[in-house]
Amino acid sequence: MSVTFWYPSCPEEEWERGCASSEHVLILSNCNAAELLRWLGYGREAGGYEDAEIDFCGELDPSDLRARCARRLWPESRNEDPGVPLERDGNLIDCGRRAGSLSAKAALLLRVAEHAAEHGESVSWG
């Protein structure tokens, strides 16, 4: 399953590209989308970062989203993105996440938020 971040007036040709992300559309796996949203401070806290519940559809204010993404791109220790190693437990495999992945995705989502703001629209995901 995947989660797509977009804005309503996104150019139609961006949707025709299929599964490729662009500066108008960001497509992530459910796990990666949830981790990115948590890292940006979204979610209903249940006991910490790892436990924050994430809805897999909704709308975000582009100004707030831009500010959150931009703050996460500042070179500060709180923004470290060390990655997560691959874990294997029998047939269950968690592929992990390379170092810097959340930062790279935040930069892509920032572009989507900037385009949404230029069009006076929210960033939708689902």
Image (cartoon, rainbow, N blue to C red):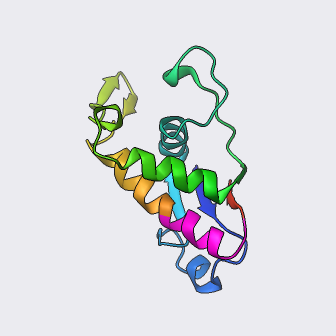
Q: How many marks?
A: 0
Q: Is residue 102 left or right of residue 20?
A: left
Residue 91 higher or lower than 126, as above or below: above
Q: Is residue 21 left or right of residue 64?
A: left
Look at the image and say whether residue 77 sits in the magenta stretch: no
Q: Does residue 19 appear in this view?
A: yes
Residue 33 higher or lower than 15, as above or below: above
Q: Position of residue 120 (x, y in %)?
A: 72, 71
Q: Position of residue 53 (x, y in %)?
A: 64, 28
Q: Which residues are magenta?
A: 111-121
State the residue at coordinates (50%, 59%).
Answer: 109
- Quadrant in the picture for residue 95: top left
Q: Position of residue 51 (x, y in %)?
A: 56, 20
Q: Does residue 25 appear in this view?
A: no
State the residue at coordinates (39%, 27%).
Answer: 91
Q: Is residue 57 left or right of residue 105?
A: right
Look at the image and say whether residue 114 sits in the magenta stretch: yes
State the residue at coordinates (54%, 56%).
Answer: 66
- Quadrant in the picture for residue 37: top right
Q: Position of residue 29 (x, y in %)?
A: 51, 49
Q: Nearer the viewer, residue 14 or 62?
A: 62
Q: Nearer the viewer, residue 113 or 86?
A: 113
Q: Main secondary structure of the magenta part?
A: helix
Q: Nearer the viewer, residue 102 or 2?
A: 102
State the residue at coordinates (53%, 45%).
Answer: 33
